[in-house]
Image (cartoon, helix red, strand yellow):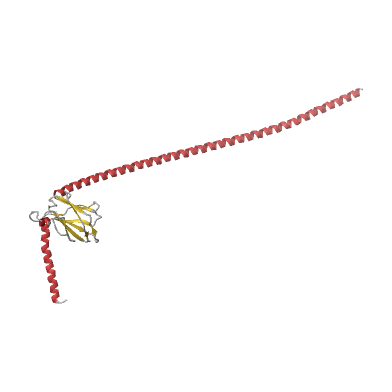
Amino acid sequence: MSRSARRFTAAVLASGALVAAAALPAIADEHDHGIGHGHTWTDPRSAVVLGAIQYNSPGYDDGSNRSLNGEWVTVTNTGRHSVNLRGWTLSDESRRTYRFDLRLAGRSSVRVHTGVGRDTSRDVYQDLRNYVWDASDTAILRDAYGRRIDSKSWGRDRDRHDRDRDGRDRRDRDRHDRDRHDRDRHDRDRHDRDRDSRDRHDRDRHDRDRHDRDRDGRDRHDRDRHDRDRDGRDRDRDHDGRDRGHDGRNGHDGRNGHDGRNGHDSRDDRGGRNHRDGRD
């Protein structure tokens, strides 16, 4: 690079730095003269958000178109892809509403002015003859379905919003505590029911086991008694058989005795006859 080219580059850089330095006080001055910053609610899923808001037109509020266009609201697409804002709305607390009809490129912003003008990719106009944004107000951005995407409040509205937010937070905490308490109570009740069910199941199983043991004991006792009775009957039959055998043997000996008596009588008869024969 030649020396002249280097000098030209240095001059361009220096002039850019001077322009930036001159612009900084202007932005700070705008911040000191009615630019709203407080986010009140933002949909975390949306890349489109509200940016800086000039709610107090600089200078004297004479109702001129220039003064009306001095108040504006910035809408910014923080994503890389463009978003179709057709049907989206921007409204204040009084429900004065502007409807978008544009596609916002990625990483870009558009200012919504109150007065009359020609729409471009960076500036659009509501074509109103009266001021919209008061010293205490709320800007609300909604999508084409009417869902709140972002909102900002300032002045008394911001304080009221903070109170409302605190009230909502407190109600949410109370509701969360109640829900948690209900869940804990439900869990305790379910635990108690499960414990009672287990205890009842254990008692039933214990009763069944005891019943089974008692039934087994009765069955065993009945079998033992049956076996004893059977053994007793068998012994009785054996004893009766032995008694009948003994009686049979005794009867045979009696007949022999009868024969013996008969023999004795025969001998006596022969002896008698012989005796008579001798005498004869």
**Residue drawn 76% across and 31% down?**
253
Tell me residue 68's x, y (percent).
11, 55
Q: For the view shown, which residue lies furthest in the right direction?
A: 280
Quadrant where the image shows the C terminus? top right
Tell me residue 231's x, y (percent).
61, 36
Tell me residue 202's x, y (percent).
42, 40
**Residue drawn 83% across and 26% down?**
265
**Residue drawn 41% across and 39% down?**
200
**Residue drawn 77% across and 29% down?**
255
Q: Is residue 216 left or right of residue 86?
A: right
Residue nearer the viewer, 207 or 173 = 173
Above or below — where is 195 with respect to 49?
A: above
Tell me residue 143's x, y (percent).
23, 54
Residue nearer the viewer, 43 or 267 = 43
Above or below — where is 226 with respect to 89?
A: above
Above or below — where is 257 with respect to 148?
A: above
Quadrant where the image shows the N terminus? bottom left
Residue nearer the viewer, 4 or 140 = 140
Residue nearer the viewer, 14 or 57 = 57
